[in-house]
Image (tube, grey):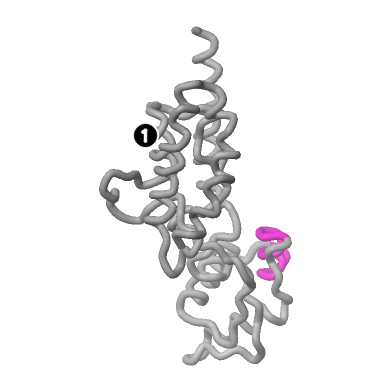
Amino acid sequence: MSENCEAQADYWMQQLAGCLNSNAAYAAKADLLRTKLLQVCKAGGDVDHLNGASTLPGSVPSGGYVSFKEAIKGGLGITSLDMLCNPWLLDAPYPYNVKLQATNVSVQKTDSSICARLAALTQEYNNAAGGFYQFLVNKFGAAMTLTEAELTSLQNSCNNCRYLLADEIQLPVFMDPGAQGYVSGFGYQQGVAAMQYTTYYYRYSWSIC
């Protein structure tokens, strides 16, 4: 895990080059920032996060930060983010609470977590026009890799005590417990609000200089 974080560090610094080159003081702190980002990445690594993580699930490690966001602010000595200096420029690793599905997952039986996810989607569907299968196709697009027969098999497996499937099925990322193969509406609105704020702050700061 440590090696995986180290392998990503140079790419992070390339993605933050615009930030570092915008201010001589920031450029002078590039090595410190790299170290702080690595600390977060490594601290978030475990058996489920082999590439590390950009946020931590627990308390702040000694002398460190709980996220790339805090590492950027602390490492550069800034109190707010802008369009050039922000954690959204870094596309890896994922936050700790978002599981990366790096390979396709095939299952021969479901379990309570998969069935709970299926039940939640069924409730969201709420007998909309077109049927449940079409609802999932409309919602997830290309990520909906199940055939209609496979979806029916998943539903049937949740109605027997052993969760058995008639045949092995490749599980779509949105059905994989703990994985997030899409951006939720709430998550999207959070991201938009954050970027709107940094855009406003950046423009306003320049307008009063």
Is 143 situated left or right of 46 in this image?
Answer: right
Q: Nearer the viewer, residue 63 or 78?
A: 63
Left or right of 207? Residue 25 is left
Asked whether 207 falls inside the magenta stretch, the response is no
Can you say whether 166 is above or below 86 in the image? below
Of 27 and 111, nearer the camera is: 27
Residue at 71% x, 70% y: name it. Answer: 145
Give the SS element for disc 1: helix
Give the quarter of the image for residue 17: top right
Q: Which residue is mark 1?
A: 74
Q: Is residue 197 above or below residue 53?
A: above
**Overall secondary structure of the magenta section:** helix
Q: Residues within 10 Å of mark 1 (few under 14, many from 20)?
A: some
Q: Position of residue 152 (x, y in %)?
A: 66, 81
- Residue 189 location in percent, x, y? 53, 41
Please identify the residue farthest to the top as the structure is shown.
209
Q: Amino acid at mark 1?
A: Gly
- The front one of 136 and 191 is 191
Pinpoint residue 2: horizontal percent, then vertical percent. 44, 59
Q: Which span is picked out in magenta? A: 129-141
Residue located 57% across and 70% down the image: 175
Looking at the image, residue 174 sits to the left or right of residue 162; the answer is right
- Residue at image x 60%, y 64%? 125
- The location of residue 169, given as percent across then percent down, is 65, 82
Query: Which residue is found at the position 42% from the left and 30% from the top?
Result: 76
